[in-house]
Image (tube, rainbow, N blue to C red):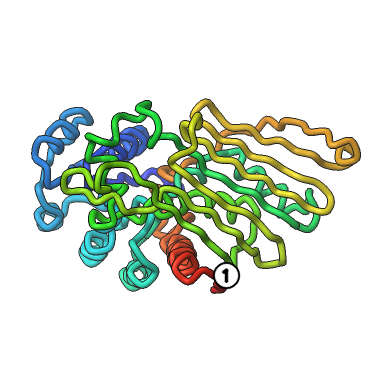
């Protein structure tokens, strides 16, 4: 990126103004040369409150209206999962770069269409896999790739949340922002689609190796009378457990649950090689990287490594827009993750291990 393009102004529109949109607004507005020029949402009251809070002048009730105006370079797509596909395709067709929330789509076929559309349009397509922002994860990946732990043999990865047994997040029984995540009819693929994609990426990225086979078990637990609250049928999965195989031969266990009592939002990755081991622990209180390397493996002695902060996805996206070149996490990578999610659903339905 040249000095000239590094400071080029970027005008951004935010599509969908629910809870996660506030993080997008804060992160993008904090970057030099980035202006939040428009908000888009079908809910007028929510849109007005969001735009007032973040000092966004232009407000649109539909994406079509925003695109007809068109005075922006890129769009942050913060809509529900089942809306990503159509809205992203429309934005790309209008020549806009897109930063999409995860998962990219609700199945692999739709995700591939989005990846292909971004390539045809020559636009940047990136996905907000939030935990790429964890510096300790990036350092762990670097150590693995440097050969610090030798040949990777075994991986353990977990994503634990307790919002179905705790009101620390709010009351899911009464709040639509949570209820839709429990209902297939409202576009949810359950914990697998919501946070399973994060822990799969956490494991794959940290291990520096792709998963090429898996066996998955999904479970939906009884949560309300008739498994329904108002318009929401509570039929999306609440917990998932996977046995996975990595390219190169390592085996692993990956699991996620919203019934993990006592855990607010905790991700753990353990990487075991024939010459050492690493552990990454990420919670709302912070992150830690533990290492067991060299002579320390004889005594099972672990040390904590201090890691410097890294650039966030939000910053990488703006840099990519200015350079005109897609960076990671890309649509293509998110499409691969969606293929794994589809495979996990099929594995659960068929009761057997499946390979890509």
Could you tell me which residue is drawn at 56 percent across and 34 percent down?
Answer: 309
**Closer to the camera in the image, 286 or 256:** 256
**Closer to the camera in the image, 43 or 226:** 226
Residue 338 versus residue 175 in the image, above or below = below
**Closer to the camera in the image, 151 or 323:** 151
Residue 335 versus residue 32 in the image, above or below = below
**Residue 322 appearing in the image:** no
**Closer to the camera in the image, 32 or 293:** 293
Residue 250 location, x and y as percent? 71, 61
Seen in the image, is 170 located left or right of residue 282?
left
Residue 148 location, x and y as percent? 79, 49
Residue 55 location, x and y as percent? 19, 30
Q: Which residue is mark 1?
A: 353
* Helix, strand or loop for disc 1: loop
Q: Residues within 10 Å of mark 1 (few under 14, many from 20)?
A: some
Seen in the image, is 15 located left or right of residue 108?
left
Residue 114 versus residue 21 in the image, above or below = below
Residue 169 location, x and y as percent? 35, 30
Location of residue 28 (image quadrant): top left
Could you tell me which residue is drawn at 52 percent across and 26 percent down?
Answer: 285
Could you tell me which residue is drawn at 44 percent across and 68 percent down?
Answer: 349
Q: Quadrant of the C terminus?
A: bottom right
């Amino acid at each position: 990126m040249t000095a000239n393009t590094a400071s080029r102004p970027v005008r951004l529109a935010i599509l969908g103004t629910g809870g996660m949109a506030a993080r997008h607004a804060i992160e993008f507005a904090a970057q030099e040369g980035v202006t939040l020029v428009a908000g888009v949402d079908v809910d007028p009251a929510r849109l007005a409150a969001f735009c007032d809070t973040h000092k966004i002048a232009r407000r649109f009730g539909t994406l079509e209206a925003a695109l007809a105006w068109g005075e922006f370079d890129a769009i942050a797509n913060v809509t529900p999962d089942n809306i990503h596909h159509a809205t992203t395709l429309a934005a790309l067709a209008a020549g806009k770069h897109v930063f999409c929330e995860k998962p990219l789509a609700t199945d692999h076929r739709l995700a591939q269409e989005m990846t292909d559309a971004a390539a045809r349009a020559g636009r940047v397509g990136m996905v907000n896999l939030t935990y790429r922002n964890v510096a300790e994860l990036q350092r762990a990946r670097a150590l693995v790739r440097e050969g610090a732990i030798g040949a990777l043999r075994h991986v353990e990865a977990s994503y634990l949340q307790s919002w179905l047994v705790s009101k620390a997040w709010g009351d899911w029984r009464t709040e639509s922002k949570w209820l839709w995540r429990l209902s297939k009819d409202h576009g949810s693929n359950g914990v697998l689609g919501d946070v399973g994609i994060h822990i799969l990426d956490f494991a794959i990225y940290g291990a520096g190796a792709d998963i090429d086979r898996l066996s998955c078990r999904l479970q939906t637990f009884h949560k309300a009378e008739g498994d329904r609250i108002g318009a929401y049928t509570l039929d999306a999965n609440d917990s998932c457990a996977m046995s996975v195989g990595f390219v190169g031969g390592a085996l692993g266990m990956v699991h996620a649950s919203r019934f993990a009592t006592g855990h607010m939002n905790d991700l753990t990755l353990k990487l075991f090689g024939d010459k050492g081991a690493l552990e990454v622990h990420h919670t709302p209180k912070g992150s830690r990287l533990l290492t067991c390397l060299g002579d320390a493996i004889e005594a099972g002695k672990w040390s904590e490594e201090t890691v410097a902060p890294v650039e966030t996805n939000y910053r990488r996206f703006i840099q990519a827009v200015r350079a005109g070149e897609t960076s990671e996490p890309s649509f293509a990578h998110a499409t691969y993750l969606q293929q794994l999610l589809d495979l996990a659903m099929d594995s659960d339905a068929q009761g057997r291990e499946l390979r890509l």
